[in-house]
Amino acid sequence: MPRVIIIWSQSAHGSAVRRGEAHEEPSENMSVERIFDELGHFQRFQACLYFAAVFQAIACGIHYLASVFLVETPNFVCGAPENITDVLYGNWTGSALWEVLPVFSGRGPLLVRTSSGEQWELSRCQSALRIDPKDFTYDFAGNRSVSACGGGFVFDHTEVQQSIVTDWDLVCDREWLAKLCQPTFMVGVLIGAVMFGDIADRVGRVRIMMFTSLCQFALGVSVAFSGNYYIFVVLRFLLAMVSSGYLVVVFVYVTEFTGNKVRTWTSMHVHAAFAVGVMVVALTGYLVRVWWIYQIILSICTSPFLLFCWKFPETPFYLMAKGRYQEVQVLLDRIGRFNGLECKMKAEDLLEPEKTEGGKALLQKEAEEQNLQPEKRLTILDLFGTWRMAGRTCTVWAIWFIGSLGYYVFSLGSVNLGGNQYINLFLAGAVEIPSYLVGCFAMDRIGRKKTCAPALILAGVACVLIIVVPAKLESLVVALSMIGKFAVAIAFGLIYLYTCELYPTIIRSLAVGSGSMMCRVGSVVAPFCVYLADVWIYLPQLIVGILAFIIGVLTLLLPETLGEPLTSTMDEAEALGQKLAKNKQAEEGVELNQTKA
């Protein structure tokens, strides 16, 4: 299969001219990026594809955060073995548990009297029968017979009418099952990121997007009808895999279908769609308090995508990398017609002139080329092919990890702010949108590296300041926490695009998928990191702060990709950052010679 080469044009002074910069001399060699120069970086064709693909990304945000209310545990207490006639809790009295349960705090038991005259002290995970009580008073100095909750559990339905916790009694000795739902989901996300990222590099982006979006709808609705906890967990695990697969591939898809003049904004705002999904979860959770109805509504929110996703074309980068030049030509003509432009470009123009071998049309020898040069199967080990690429991959993975870890540590810590949980979750999604806008603005002006590194360092500094600031200054602590989350969101948002630009077409989806895998490792580790607050209240912030600062410094060693065309081969990707350094050294040498002269 012929190699797709992306070449920078050389100016009269020997310095590379970045794509998008004004230059009068035409490049002798064309690249796949030239498609966007000829047919538009973000015209009608790309815009329609972009908004349709990003619309389905809302479903990813929905399913990732849906468990917040699926496994919500309302206030509860042990049920009495008989009918209750009187209830007493401190100064509160009633004739039924549901009357007093909203004020039950778990400090001290609920005292109830049954129709047979027995008095029971009901706690959350145990009940005690009073032996020979004299009066129905809260204080009792006599003997008790303590036992497990024989009468089941009674839940407060004031806020939560029905969740999987209330349906399957996932409390007390079964509480760990409820807590296992989100980590299990994240493990599915981890596996799906790697698996579908690899498959997308083999079979194409569109096939994976169609498959995962269809499975998101089918599995999402199926979760609502799961008959027991174990079926629920398995279905959610599969849903996590396909949701992660779509999210990984859609980033690559929009990156390969938009020109580098708008690529920063288009890739970053996929995250904005994810944030919209978080806000949809908060709004739906507020309006619908029955978990299976809530799950169905969330699953059908983006179902219209299924009506037109089958019309999506494969990306030109993937088609060229696979040597499918006839399909490239059809795609070029289609883009030109849709954008109202005359397409004079040929698929052969996207390769180096010498690749045409004496003028023989590539379209006529496509099958012969593919038979003579079988496709090399790339694996995750190719990300570590050289020392330079290995160091780059380790740093990129670290950014993915700390981005996810910091995001969830800040998010889980925000529940301590109090207030309405639905509003808190809605704001948690809304606060991400301005961070992506700021990130886009900075990335296009100062570069990817110079945006990511300061953002991580700022997050680290914010974590340290949270430790230093007195706990009494709650407003300042909240402000610092929001600054930390804002900074982490910037770094977390740009790493998708940065990863796409740091790796070539032949392994780009795998690079993003493996990075997303490290991201999910961070999301799985995050709850355990939060639990360390029992050891020291500021230990989670200390861990995130140190890691964010160190990784932010390491990010400064990565090459800058702002204004550079996407690479297609490993050699081109490895050369990123070297050309500018060599040109700079050459210019310094010229200046030194002129000084000596």
Image: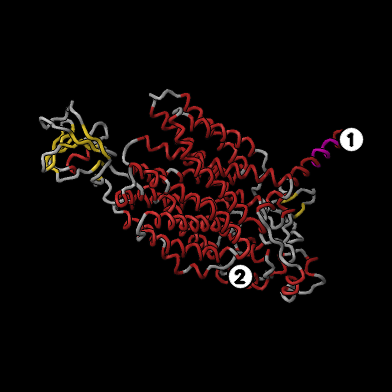
Q: Is residue 232 visible?
A: yes
Identify which amino acid the numbered label 2 is placed on: Leu
Q: Is residue 230 above or below residue 351?
A: above
Residue lying at 74% horizontally and 53% vertically, measured from the top left: 571
Q: Give the SS element for disc 2.
A: helix
**Mark 1 lies on residue:** 597
Question: Looking at the figure, which quarter contains the C terminus?
Answer: top right
Q: Is residue 24 left or right of residue 500?
A: right
Q: Position of residue 532 (x, y in %)?
A: 46, 32
Q: Which residues are magenta?
A: 586-592
Residue type, mark 1 in image: Ala
Few, some or many residues within 10 Å of mark 1 (<14, 14–19, 20+): few
The residue singled out by tag 2 in the image is 331
Q: Give residue 98's position: percent from left, percent from top.
A: 19, 44
Taking the image as shown, residue 333 lies to the left or right of residue 572, namely left
Q: Nearer the viewer, residue 500 or 392?
A: 392
| Up-down relation of residue 350 to residue 384 (above or below) | below
* Outermost right residue: 597
Q: Is residue 562 left or right of residue 310?
A: right
Q: Position of residue 165 (x, y in %)?
A: 32, 48
Q: Is residue 137 above or below residue 329?
A: above
First in sequence: mark 1 vs mark 2: 2
Compare residues 5 and 232 and report the one nearer the observer.
232
SS label for mark 1:
loop
Label 2: few (<14), some (14–19) or many (≥20) C-alpha neighbours in 10 Å = some
In 3D space, how far apart are the residues under numbered discs 1 and 2 (Cα atoms)? 56 Å
